[in-house]
Image (cartoon, rainbow, N blue to C red):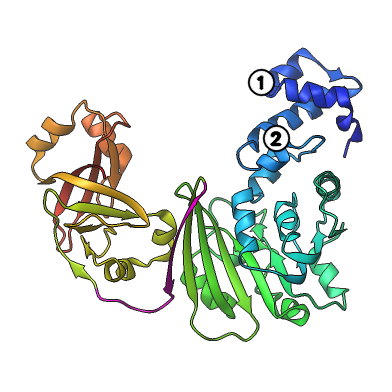
Amino acid sequence: MNTKLLNKDIQEFINAHLDSNPFDLTLKHREFNGVSMSEIAEQIDSKRRIKDKLPTWFKADSILYPNKSRLQQSSSEITARHKCELVSGTSIIDITGGFGVDCFYLAKSFTDVYYCEQEEELHNVAVHNFEVLKAKNIKAFNDDGLDVLKNSKMHFNWIYADPSRRHESKGKVFFIEDCQPDVIEHLDLFFNHSEKVLLKLSPMLDLSRTIKDLGHVKRIDIVAVNNELKELLFVLEKDYINQIMVNCFNYKGEQKSKYEFEWGSDSSVSYGVPEVGDFLYEPNVAILKGGAFKHLSHDFELNKLGLNSHLYFSNRKKEFPGRRFLIKDIQPYSNKSDLKQKLRNSQANISTRNFLLTVEVIRKKYKIKDGGDRYVFFTADQVGNKLVIYCKKA
């Protein structure tokens, strides 16, 4: 950690060049006041990236930042605050500390927080920022969190871990064994030091497989921000074998929607085809990830278009955890002349649900520009009929 970056003139330079191209700065200057411009440019780039994600850090003076890959792995303030609704107590240990955002917020819900990060540079940056942000109840260890646990005789109220993708794993991660540390292998270690464990896992993980692999699962929170899936949070309790509650959250500004259901339970569902003038409902991404498809139909008294289409409808306007539309027209996909007349060289928001073509292919085929106030769904009903549903937001 280069403490020269904290010099007043360099901090002023960083703040004055937040709108500049960091790469261009490295071409124009080799250094500034004894600090390489590449280091300064990295701070500028990182600070710009966290403006919306971490506004508390952005607004504070003398904050240091890691490189962009570390920032991408970090929780946002919204998702970090969410974790504080799940856990509280006297003590918690974060065995995968990282940039320290989760630790900072966990410190508001616990008397003592133990932060573990084995990468020295990242550890030093986080500890410095804790001091700047006056998080005085965080005790830091520059060590592997698993080793800290193995060498400790302490018992914690909670253990927190955010396993990252293994270096040899390429592309998307669908299984927990593709992450490190291997939490399945170390569950006995965790439960020797705590009755409760909170895991932040990749939103790409398969829920059924992860529940089976982990065991002890008491609760799952699926967290989205602005309808973009961000985190899967698994609450484990030692020897827990009862019903698992799944909570689907979508944050939008200061508002939060929540939908919950029991994992593995079933509900009745009615299938059908909507009519012009009906309302169409599309669940948010957290609910889609959770797979609560039949529960939605039952709980909101909605008809479902098809088993795998995941669109719902009714003849009455209802509050719903997702997007709501008014249906203006419905046509069979086989009516190609109507499609060309309504869509060619037009502007519309295209979505597909259980359909044979992708959005990109449809846009290219009919030369459709993205945007506008018209929404068009390409989908299929319960018996497999391909439909095109024209809507506006309601």
Residue at position x 32%, y 31% in the image: 370
Question: Does the stretch in magenta take in 159?
Answer: no
Quarter that holds the N terminus: top right
**Dot 2: element:** helix
Image point (23%, 54%), residue name: 317
Q: CA distance from mark 2 to mark 1?
A: 12 Å
Q: Position of residue 115 (x, y in %)?
A: 80, 60
**Mark 2 lies on residue:** 46
Mark 1 residue element? loop
The numbered mark at residue 242 is none
x%, y% of residue 254?
A: 52, 48
Q: Residue at x 81, y 48 (%)?
A: 126
The residue at which mark 1 appears reads as 21
Question: What type is the residue that disc 1 sits on?
Answer: Asn
Kind of residue sitting beneath label 2: Ser
Span of residues in magenta: 254-268
